[in-house]
Image: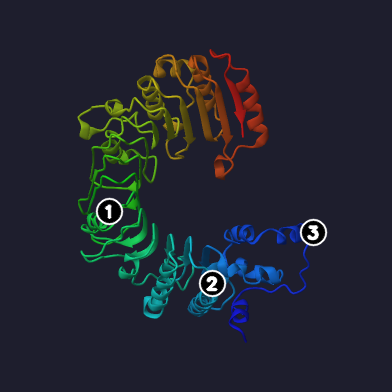
Amino acid sequence: MEVEEEIMNKGVKETMDWKPTREENLITKLPDHLLLNIISFLPIKDAINTSLLSKKWRFLWTLTPNLDFDQRLIIPQNPSFSESRKLFANFIDRALLLYQGSSIQRLRIWFDFDPDLFESHIDSWIRFEIRRNVIELDLDLSGDMRDPEFSYTTPYFLNEASLIRGSVRVLKVCFGGLYPPPYYRFPSITTVHLKQYALMDHTIPDLFTFCPQLENLVLDSVFGEMLHLKICSAKLKTLSIMNYERDGEITSVDILAPNLVSFSCINYIADEYTLKDVSSLEEAVVLFPQQDDKFFPHWSKIIKFLGHVRSLKVQNLWGMQHPQQNGECSEKICPSKFRYLELVTGLSEMELLGIARILRLSPNLEIMVLQMVVKTDDNVSQEIYTTDFLEKLLTGSPICLKKLKITSFMATDNELELLKYLLKYGLTLEKIILVPSKTGLASVPPQHFAERFQELQAFPRSSQSAEIFSF
């Protein structure tokens, strides 16, 4: 049996009775470079299936610039994960044997990795792609945690030597490790995305030394002995740190990046945060696991460095006052220069106070997005606030907003009262967009939303150009 036929038998369904439609015949008449572009968007199983369409298609997939190997899609019907691993590894071996392209734009592999059995396979696949000048290398070796046979083992450690002379610019690894010795350099890499990755305190400084052109870095759910994250780079432009917490140990984040443009801190819980010389920063995202006042100390230590950003997505904790600050309110850390603000918020008195402070202290704010959340155990958030109460709380100051969007809109009385207030004082308001909640207990029945929407249209407004839309 030919190798190509063996690959088809490893999970690729043949459709021998297939007959092309008129549209499919027209596609077949396209020049090869356009057909290759179409195939490049397909997972490898579907790309190989195109070889059944006609003689013209038979070997086109072997020239595709993108190779996407996903164990879940290629070997979906097998009695055990151990068997599917073997079939999948053999599938890739045979596919690469048939591959004829001279260069590869992107290689992606999703594999339920077992280091005792398949480390040499992965090494050989990477060497194969490096020889073909792969630009983006994406390895997800974490496996399927929902599968009863899944269990974490030793992560895959990249063979650093294979990357040195390669053309890799984008490196993404999930469930791995990288401890390069000091004489290695990866001069072409500009983007590194590490998830469920083994790191130590010295690894990140080393990474910037070994990747002198590194501009984009993502650290997601890292593990190992990394307690003090230190990032010092004049090249770095985007940084995302996510999903990290060490109980019982002092942790810190120290960032010095004069050309940093975008920064995200999502569920990365440390005791201390320091951002130095981040004057180029234009956009930031700061989110913690819940809309909970216990995260205020962490939140406030980051927000105080972001007063100059133009775009911010953050939880609304501005209405809080924390004992550790000796009564000093969060108004002291309210940014004043941003033009776009996305708030994860409810409508408790504390959160309304936060919205009031933001509107009062942000004269340049043009677009605000409110992502509504409800804490069902918070009795205060269930209070119905009257217009008079909002007038007193929000001070009745003119509002310079141009656009307001509310997502997960639940059409509650409090939401309508807030909108009534914003319409009354929004002198420059041009557009309000409401996106009703459609999930869980907060789901809004269409008829109830329609009634509330009609009620809202009748509210008086100071800006005659203000329009209200729904999606």
Ranked by sequence position, the earlier of labels 3 and 2 is: 3
Residue for point 51% across, 74% down: 96
Looking at the rendered structure, the kind of residue marked 2 is Gln
Quadrant assignment for the N terminus: bottom right
Q: What residue is pinned by disc 3?
A: 22
Q: Position of residue 33 (x, y in %)?
A: 61, 59
Residue 411: tell me if it is visible.
Answer: no
Amino acid type of the residue that numbered disc 3 sits on in the rendered structure: Arg
CA distance for labels 3 and 2: 30 Å
Q: Is residue 447 above or below residue 366?
A: below
CA neighbours of label 2 inside 10 A, class few (<14), some (14 to 19), many (20+)? some
Mark 3 surroundings: few (<14), some (14-19) or many (≥20) residues within 10 A? few
Q: Which residue was labeled with disc 1?
A: 212
What residue sits right under mark 2 in the picture? Answer: 100
Colour treatment of the image: rainbow
Residue 196 in view, yes or no: yes
Between circles 3 and 2, the one closer to the viewer is 2
For marks 3 and 1, the one nearer the N-term is: 3
Residue 402, percent from left and from top: 50, 22
SS at circle 3? helix
Q: CA distance from mark 3 to mark 1?
A: 53 Å
Q: Amino acid at mark 1?
A: Pro
Q: Earlier in the sequence, mark 1 or mark 2?
A: 2
Q: Quadrant of the C terminus?
A: top right
Side of 361 where 232 appears, left or right: left
Residue 44: % across, % down: 57, 67
